[in-house]
Image (cartoon, rainbow, N blue to C red):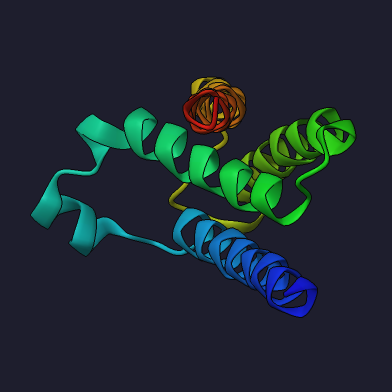
Amino acid sequence: MKIIKHLSERNYLYLAVIWAVLIAVLSLVSLNSISKEINISSNDKFFHFVFYAILTVLLLLYKRKTKYNLLIILFVIIYGIIIEILQALLTTNREADIYDAIANSLGAITGLVLLRIVKNKKNNKNF
């Protein structure tokens, strides 16, 4: 049974890495043709918020001990800031945006809060 738990935790790490790479690709590649079709620009901050919330949840599910929560949140926030800086340095059609970094950070914090709410509700059902 412990092997199954270990494998599922490792899968969360794999998903988190894939998700982080997806965030980097979507942030650093030109999406002009795609963004016009689905109007990403008006929902940009929402997408930042959701993507970083999901990344946080995946990492928190990988490292389930609460002693890692602050480290994971800091990692995700710093990752978001680095991605914003890379947009300014490596792309010609994208730019760093402090509001994107704020949306990323709020998404990371919200991911932690939501996961804690879900865990508390699950633990309360057991009583």
Looking at the rendered image, the quarter that the C terminus falls into is top right
Q: Residue furthest front?
A: 127
Horizontal side, residue 2 vs residue 40: left or right: right
The vertical placement of 98 against 42, above or below, is above
Horizontal side, residue 32 vs residue 127: left or right: left
Q: Quadrant of residue 15?
A: bottom right
The percent position of residue 42, horizontal first and vertical second, equals 21, 31
Name the residue located 59 percent from the left edge and 66 percent from the top edge.
Answer: 21
Horizontal side, residue 48 vs residue 65: left or right: left
Name the residue located 62 percent from the left edge and 40 percent from the top edge.
Answer: 84
The vertical placement of 68 against 86, above or below, is above
Q: How many marks?
A: 0
60 or 85: nearer the viewer: 60
Q: Inspect this view and state whether residue 11 appears.
A: yes
63 or 121: nearer the viewer: 121
The vertical placement of 62 against 39, above or below, is below
Looking at the rendered image, the quarter that the N terminus falls into is bottom right
The percent position of residue 70, horizontal first and vertical second, equals 83, 28
Q: Quadrant of residue 49?
A: top left
The percent position of residue 53, horizontal first and vertical second, equals 51, 37
Q: Inspect this view and state whether residue 104 appears.
A: no
Name the residue located 52 percent from the left edge and 56 percent from the top edge.
Answer: 23
Horizontal side, residue 103 vs residue 14: left or right: left
Name the residue located 65 percent from the left edge and 40 percent from the top edge.
Answer: 80
4 or 45: nearer the viewer: 4
